């Protein structure tokens, strides 16, 4: 059912660019993440005010827009400790959400950051949360672009050195652990950046679509919330409410989200979770090799069942066999090539439309024809983290809307891989994902997904089973992994389900924090010391 | 029907705690009766096993000390209880004749957990006259409040059935892990052994010990199998 009311128009010039844009989709395949400590409020405010002038906004780029696409982007986020150091009045500070005020480390028990994910194992810089105040994220189309933007940041840091210090203590692939920044970049194959992550999957496909961004309306397919109609068509989807991702707007509960005071401080801003996630590539590959020989579909199918997507990105619920997934990828590539090869005109438009139709197959699906999980396992990574209406378990109208249990748990995913895999059998190198999740409420969205859907299985009727890829699997007394997953079979198909046991932890936390991403207006207010909660 | 959901029964009893405090002991500050009762409950939290686990047919139970009712704010009336209460809430299997089942349950409680019952209720008004199973049943029934919105989170089978189900479910998942991929005669033979060992129809055992949390410390087996049959396959330990 659509919600009546006037369309949401957002002042995209006031909203930081990383909220609306996944930069890596715009060919920004390099990034640098820099942390700062503020030791003097006045200098700190000057620093923020200067940055506010340079922050990349969500305004559209290119055709029909006044904005040129820049070589690099720059965005700013603040921790609770940072806001305090910047001199926000106590009355304002108290209006931020409690989990944000506590910080990621303090929420470790909820997040499952235990054992090898514990803070003792984090990069040194993340181990002193009281000193982490400002995060600057730079994305660039090239390494040079990154260097230029970084030089700019270093320059203004120097200008405010009386009270602003860049924090060192990031680990890097050369084994240093005192780096002044975290580098990240798309994994390159044959010298070209790819959307792959270190386990070999195509990543960054699915992301929520919400009202007011000006994104192409077709992107509501798969990105919006499910209706009760066919998910392969536009009728199957509606945009999510803006307030799920931006403060100051109506959310899926038809309310304004809890937000800091005064309203201008929160409006057009949001919260952001930053997590440095190490990938045990050796363990993952060894597990796939070993169990892949026992699994009837083989190793690649096993990998697909873990993620809910084939490593080439094709959703396993739509393309149940490797052959189908391969054929689809080929068609997709051919359709893409055809656009380039077709001269401008109606034929080119036709080619584009054909491509768009294929492209939609990556995202325009739900699990309504796959409730028992014989296609995409109920415990697969993408089905856990976005169940797409399947929590009605086929009982139509179990809730008012089919997505009732999902729509308030969506997250905008940002970030890039870091490091590189030198030896695919080795766990210990520097490689993983800098994972960022944005949303209006960390507790309700990211933390819920992480605690209830990633590290527990009850909502899916999967008992204690965790997410196969990112779950914080424990160890048996003998020191082996104790993670497990059921790969469901077609009911009545004569084949038993396949049980994966003995899974070790494939992903471990190496640091992170909770941030607030202010609007440009709020950055100015903070920078000028004008936040007035009365 | 209040208090009932099929053959399950939801008992709620509010037992008034006496005003006043214990007689002071040398070197120890005296505790009020309500606070002392709460101390005892908190100590139960620390105990390795709940003394209520041995009371037949307990699905779930809970004790708490209620000092007062919550105030909802104006225009609601600010209510005050005349005393603190020991609240005893139990989900239990009562069978078709529910009042009869409740009586049997409370008798079982007296029979299997009398020391706990005596210490928890020690400071409740009028409990000093309770010295038999019958008197305990009468006492709790006098304190019972009707439960008109009862929801039972499990099936309504007798507890022994449920425990056997739980045990079999865990054992079966272990079996599935151990024998994945085996075919025909081999699988059948293994399943035969599984049936012999787990005795699906024998509620007396092997089965799940009431109150236990994991299979490894839960199994009650009058004739334990040889160790080599009990090795834990990886991943199946939960
Ligand atoms: C190293 C860690 C991780 C890896 C390797 C990983 C991998 C993947 C892959 C391969 C996909 C499919 C591509 C796509 O749909 O975009 C995906 C999707 C997704 N992941 Fe992760 N992920 C990781 C961490 C996380 C975390 C920590 C969360 C949240 C708690 C998360 C939430 C999601 C969501 C929401 C989707 C999209 C699901 C959908 O809309 O269908 N991921 N991830």
Image (cartoon, helix red, strand yellow):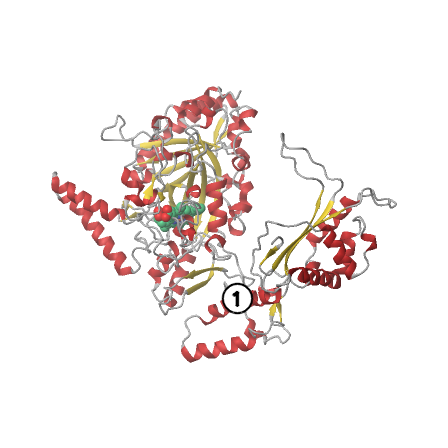
Q: Crowding at label 1, few (<14), some or many (≥20) Cα neighbours within 10 Å?
A: few
Q: Closer to the camera, A153 or B231?
A: B231
Image coords of residue A491 (percent x, y): 38, 65
Q: Horizontally, is A358 left or right of A180 in the view?
A: left
Residue A176 in view here: no
Image coords of residue A136 (percent x, y): 42, 32
Write the residue at 11% across / 38% down.
Answer: A345
Check the image and report above or below for A295 versus A446: below
Check the image and report above or below for A84 versus A332: above
User: In the displayed image of the protein, which residue is found farthest to the front?
Assistant: B1
Q: Horizontally, is A468 left or right of B12 in the view?
A: left
Image coords of residue B28 (percent x, y): 84, 44
Q: Is mark 1 within 8 Å of ligand 1?
A: no
Residue B25 in view here: yes
Q: In which quarter of the image is residue A154?
A: top left
Q: Quadrant of residue A204?
A: top left
Image coords of residue A185 (percent x, y): 35, 42
Q: Closer to the camera, A344 or A373?
A: A373
Identify the residue position indicated by label 1 in the image: B169
Q: Closer to the camera, B19 or B168?
A: B19
Q: The numbered mark 1 sits on a residue in which chain?
A: B
Q: Horizontally, is B35 left or right of B197 in the view?
A: right
Write the residue at 27% across / 40% down.
Answer: A218
Q: In which quarter of the image is residue A183?
A: top left
| Figure quadrant of the N terminus of chain A | top left
């Amino acid at each position: 059912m659509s919600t009546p009311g006037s369309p949401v128009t957002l002042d995209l010039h006031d909203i930081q660019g990383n909220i609306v844009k996944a930069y890596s989709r715009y060919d920004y395949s390099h990034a640098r993440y820099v942390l700062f400590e503020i030791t003097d409020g006045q200098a700190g405010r000057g620093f923020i005010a200067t940055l506010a002038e340079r922050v990349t906004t969500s305004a559209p780029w290119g055709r029909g827009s006044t904005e040129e696409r820049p070589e690099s982007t720059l965005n700013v986020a603040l921790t609770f400790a940072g806001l305090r150091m910047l001199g926000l009045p106590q009355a304002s500070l108290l209006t931020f959400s409690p989990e944000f005020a506590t910080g990621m480390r303090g929420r470790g028990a909820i997040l499952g950051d235990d054992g090898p994910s514990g803070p003792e194992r984090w990069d040194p810089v993340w181990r002193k949360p009281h000193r982490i105040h400002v995060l600057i994220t730079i994305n660039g189309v090239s390494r040079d672009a990154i260097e230029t933007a970084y030089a700019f940041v270093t320059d203004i840091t120097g200008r405010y050195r009386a009270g602003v210090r860049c924090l060192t203590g990031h680990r890097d692939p050369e084994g240093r652990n005192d780096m002044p920044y975290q580098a990240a970049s798309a994994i390159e194959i044959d010298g070209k950046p790819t959307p792959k992550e270190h386990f070999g999957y195509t990543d960054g496909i699915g992301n929520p679509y919400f009202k007011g961004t000006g994104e192409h309306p077709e992107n509501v397919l798969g990105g919006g919330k499910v209706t009760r109609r066919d998910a392969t068509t536009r009728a199957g989807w509606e945009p999510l409410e803006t307030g799920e991702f931006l403060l100051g707007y109506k959310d899926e509960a038809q309310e304004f989200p809890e937000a800091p005071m005064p309203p201008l401080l929160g409006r057009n801003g949001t919260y952001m979770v930053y997590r440095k996630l190490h990938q045990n590539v050796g363990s993952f590959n060894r597990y796939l090799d070993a169990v892949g020989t026992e699994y009837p579909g083989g190793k690649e199918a096993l990998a697909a069942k873990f993620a809910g997507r084939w490593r080439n990105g094709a959703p396993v619920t739509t393309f149940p066999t490797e052959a189908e997934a391969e054929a689809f990828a080929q068609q997709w590539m051919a359709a893409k090539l055809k656009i380039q090869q077709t001269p401008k005109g109606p034929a080119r438009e036709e080619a584009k439309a054909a491509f768009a139709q294929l492209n939609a197959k990556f995202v325009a699906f739900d699990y309504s024809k796959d409730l028992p999980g014989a296609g995409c396992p109920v415990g697969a990574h993408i089905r856990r983290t976005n169940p797409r209406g399947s929590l009605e378990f086929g009982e139509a109208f179990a809730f008012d809307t089919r997505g009732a249990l999902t729509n308030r748990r969506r997250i905008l995913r940002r970030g890039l891989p870091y490091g590189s895999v030198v030896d695919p059998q080795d766990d210990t190198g520097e490689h993983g994902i800098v994972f960022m999740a944005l949303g209006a409420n960390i507790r309700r969205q990211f933390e819920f997904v992480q605690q209830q859907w990633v590290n527990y299985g009850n909502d899916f009727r999967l008992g204690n089973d965790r997410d196969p890829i990112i779950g914080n699997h424990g160890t048996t007394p003998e020191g082996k992994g104790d993670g497990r997953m059921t790969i469901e079979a077609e009911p009545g198909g004569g084949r038993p389900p396949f049980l994966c046991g003995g899974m070790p932890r494939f992903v471990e936390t190496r640091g992170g924090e909770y941030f607030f991403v202010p609007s440009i207006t709020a950055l100015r207010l903070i920078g000028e010391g004008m936040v007035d909660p009365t | 029907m209040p208090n009932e959901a099929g053959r399950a029964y939801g008992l709620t009893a509010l037992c008034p705690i006496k005003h006043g405090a214990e007689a002071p002991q040398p070197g120890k500050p005296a505790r009020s009766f309500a606070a002392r009762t709460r101390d005892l409950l908190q100590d139960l939290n620390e105990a390795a096993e709940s003394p209520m686990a041995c009371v037949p047919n307990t699905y779930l139970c809970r004790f708490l000390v209620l000092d007062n009712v919550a105030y909802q704010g104006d225009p609601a009336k600010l209510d005050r209880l005349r005393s603190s209460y020991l609240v005893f809430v139990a989900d239990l299997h009562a069978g078709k004749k529910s009042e009869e089942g409740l009586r049997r349950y409370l008798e079982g409680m007296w029979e299997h957990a009398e020391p706990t019952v005596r210490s928890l209720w020690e400071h409740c008004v009028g409990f000093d006259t309770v010295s038999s199973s019958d008197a305990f049943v009468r006492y709790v029934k006098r304190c019972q409040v009707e439960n008109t919105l009862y929801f039972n989170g499990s099936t309504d089978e007798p507890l022994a059935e449920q425990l056997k189900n739980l045990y079999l479910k865990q054992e079966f998942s272990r079996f599935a892990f151990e024998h994945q991929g085996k075919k025909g005669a081999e699988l059948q033979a293994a399943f035969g052994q599984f049936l012999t060992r787990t005795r699906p129809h024998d509620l007396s055992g092997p089965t799940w010990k009431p109150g236990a949390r994991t299979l490894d410390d839960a199994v009650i087996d009058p004739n334990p199998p040889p160790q080599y049959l009990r090795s834990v396959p990886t991943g199946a330990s939960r």
